[in-house]
Image (tube, grey):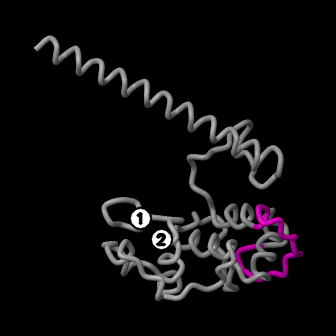
Amino acid sequence: ETNRLAKRTQQIEERKEIREIEIDLIEKIMEKMKEKFVDKNNIMENKAENDFAYDELVTRAEFVSYIIRGLGAEEVPYKGEFGDVTAEDSFANELQAAVEIGMISKDTNFYPDRNVSREEVCKILLFALGEETCQEEDVTAEFQSLTDYTNISQWAIGFVRKAMKIGMMKGIGNNVFD
């Protein structure tokens, strides 16, 4: 019994050490990302002084801005495409660039403060990779096994299927895309 307890204690200590290593590694990766995307290339901005905020949700406006900057696309003066965006908004010119290259569709509103959805991430990232349209035939067994696949917006089905097919995105667990 004493041996078993000692062995279990050792396993717990080893797991704690592994977890500390994992956390240290994640922190180093995030620091490198901050250096590359925030400090050097001005693609992303700190949420607060020295806070990369990698664990926070991203809004639609932020995500579009990050991708346009990351692609090195030129900003375009905002033309008033959306009722909830003004030319004074910090992201307006990047949004206009995204509209003009076809990454973002024109609509009545953009909802810039709403968190970007996984569907939208699929479409925007695939567009950035050169996939302007994705057909529904990009079916995978993984996609078909999603219990919530009927909740995926019709416009996004091809993009979600393609993202899953190439391994860019997976479900969140328990066969759920969300």
Looking at the picture, which amino acid does disc 1 mark?
A: Gly
Q: Give the range drawn in magenta.
A: 68-85
Residue closest to the eye, 107 or 102: 102
Query: Is 79 contained in the magenta span?
Result: yes
Disc ID at residue 43: none
Asked if residue 154 is positioned above or below residue 23 in the image, the reply reads: below
Q: Mark 1 points at which residue?
A: 171
What residue is shown at x 18% (from left), y 16% (from top)? 5
Position of 21 compared to 46: left or right?
A: left
Q: Quadrant of the N terminus?
A: top left
Q: Where is residue 12 in the image (x, y as percent from the top left)?
A: 31, 24
Q: In which quarter of the image is the C terminus?
A: bottom left
Q: Quadrant of residue 6?
A: top left
Q: Please tell me which of labels 1 and 2 falls first in the chain.
A: 2
Q: Mark 2 points at which residue?
A: 164
Q: Position of residue 150 (x, y in %)?
A: 36, 81
